[in-house]
Image (cartoon, rainbow, N blue to C red):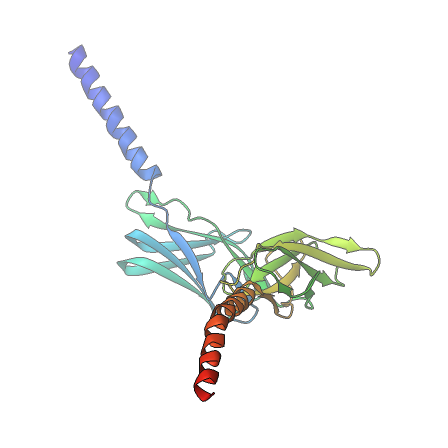
């Protein structure tokens, strides 16, 4: 009797542990945003929550906002829920997560997604501390400058979804301006090196300024190598050219 009771108790405890394990290890969803995680104010944004197992109810959570921030229910099981923001404003900048309802409860939260909204302060200026023509393999420092007292500056590279670099602001005594310095490189000719920078205040880190004018860095390595090869090819052809001219003169003579 004692053996039977112990066996049943052991089996029940193990089944309970397996059930708890399944609830705690629900597949967490993935979160994405279109057209990108950096968007100008007034633009439309779609935040998508995707799952592999399918669900009928999805929730979107924004840090600092009501919980849940948005809820979407569907009559049929689906693998994706889309949350539309028709026109982004200052209050939409922030960090988002999503989760969904499972047969045993709510799933784990997705990884965080940061949405930055731009266009709320005057634009900074972006320049290089040297020439905009850089030799392949070198590193260049970009300088983002503003008269506004931003706490931080952000550098973005054209074609990339996420900010490239974030730097604390430094005060320039000689001009009374604020700057962020960004080392970039080593550069190479196989990529396009186009950048913009923004400024923001630390109390609202997802609310950015207008973008700076576009700065393009030109990498000279490709042009230099092709020019060198052209010179070498011409030197190699020189003896054959001289021989041809000599034979031509002999025939005419």
Q: Nearer the viewer, residue 130 or 122?
A: 130
Quadrant of the rendered image containing residue 56:
bottom left
Q: Relative to residue 179, is residue 244 depicted above or below?
A: below
Q: Relative to residue 76, is residue 122 depicted above or below?
A: below
Quadrant of the rendered image containing residue 147:
bottom right
Can residue 72 be seen? yes
**Residue at (52% x, 71% y) in the render:** 43
The location of residue 187, given as percent across then percent down, is 56, 58
The location of residue 88, given as percent across then percent down, is 54, 67
Q: Nearer the viewer, residue 112 or 218?
A: 218
Q: Nearer the viewer, residue 233 or 206?
A: 233
Q: Relative to residue 58, is residue 21 depicted above or below?
A: above
Quadrant of the rendered image containing residue 34:
bottom left
The location of residue 180, given as percent across then percent down, is 69, 56
Q: Relative to residue 85, is residue 68 depicted above or below?
A: above
Can residue 204 be seen? no
Question: In the shown orientation, is residue 75 left or right of residue 113?
Answer: left
Question: In the shown orientation, is residue 54 left or right of residue 131?
Answer: left
Quadrant assignment for the N terminus: top left
């Amino acid at each position: 009797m004692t053996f039977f009771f112990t066996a049943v108790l052991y089996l029940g405890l193990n089944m309970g542990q397996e059930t708890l394990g399944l609830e705690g290890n629900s597949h967490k969803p993935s979160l994405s945003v279109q057209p990108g995680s950096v968007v100008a104010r007034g633009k439309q944004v779609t935040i998508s929550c995707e799952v592999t197992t399918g669900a009928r109810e999805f929730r979107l959570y924004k840090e600092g906002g009501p919980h849940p921030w948005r809820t979407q229910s569907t009559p049929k099981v689906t693998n994706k829920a889309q949350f539309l923001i028709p026109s982004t404003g200052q209050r939409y900048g922030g960090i988002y997560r999503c989760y969904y309802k499972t047969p045993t409860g709510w799933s784990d939260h997705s990884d965080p997604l940061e949405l930055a909204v731009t266009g709320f302060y005057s634009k900074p200026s972006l320049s290089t501390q040297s020439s905009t023509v850089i030799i392949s393999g070198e590193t260049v420092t970009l300088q983002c400058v503003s008269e506004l007292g931003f706490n931080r500056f952000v550098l973005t590279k054209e074609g990339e979804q996420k900010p490239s670099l974030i730097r604390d602001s430094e005060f320039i005594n000689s001009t009374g301006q604020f700057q962020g310095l960004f080392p970039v490189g080593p550069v190479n000719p196989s990529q396009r090196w186009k950048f913009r920078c923004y400024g923001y205040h630390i109390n609202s880190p997802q609310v950015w300024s207008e973008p700076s004018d576009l700065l393009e860095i030109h990498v000279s390595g490709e042009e230099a190598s092709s020019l060198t090869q052209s010179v070498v090819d011409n030197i190699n052809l020189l003896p054959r050219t001289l021989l041809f001219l000599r034979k031509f003169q002999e025939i005419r003579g």
